[in-house]
Amino acid sequence: MFGYTFWPEKLLHVNVNALVGAGGAAITKSMKYMSNDTKNKDSINKQFVYASSGYFIFEPGAGVELNITKFMRVELGVSYRIVSGLDLPSVSNKDLGGLTGNLAFKFGAF
């Protein structure tokens, strides 16, 4: 995750960020039917996973932060998740992507 905060010394300021990475998704049977046999987890996983796929993710975003104290900030932000490379039946890249909002409480030495 990369980011930059503009005018962090101001009471109200702006930040921009981007998440870049990879993920994985799987379509499985309901977990309630899984065995408690912990010795043979590989065969259990193969039996219950119908399909799996890796994917690339890019999520640019921006937020407005409010300095509450010297060590606390509150952020209200928005981002847009872009997913590429997902290969699952009946699940598309757009199903995992889209617009998101967030509320964050940040603590530390700023």
Image: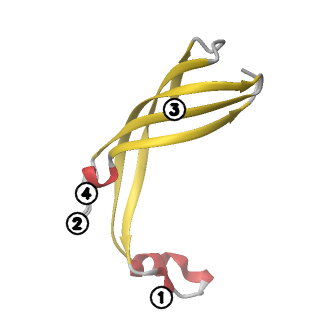
What is the three-letter code of the residue carrying label 1? Answer: Tyr
Measuring 61% from the left and 82% from the top, which residue is drawn there? 39
Q: Position of residue 20 (x, y in %)?
A: 43, 35
Measuring 52% from the left and 24% from the top, which residue is drawn there? 3
Question: Of residues 39 and 23, which is closer to you in this image?
Answer: 23
Q: Position of residue 55 (x, y in %)?
A: 34, 49
**CB under 8 Å between discs 1 and 3:** no
Q: Which mark is residue 93?
A: none
Task: Return the disc, 1 or 3, that comes first in the chain's sequence.
Answer: 3
Measuring 48% from the left and 34% from the top, which residue is drawn there? 77
Residue ID for mark 1: 33
* Real-space CA distance between mark 2 and mark 1, rounded to the nearest whole angstrom: 22 Å
Looking at the picture, does residue 57 appear above or below residue 71?
below
> What is the secondary structure assignment of the residue under circle 1?
helix
Residue ID for mark 3: 1
**CB under 8 Å between discs 3 and 2:** no
Image quadrant in which you'd find residue 67:
top right
> What is the secondary structure assignment of the residue under circle 2?
loop
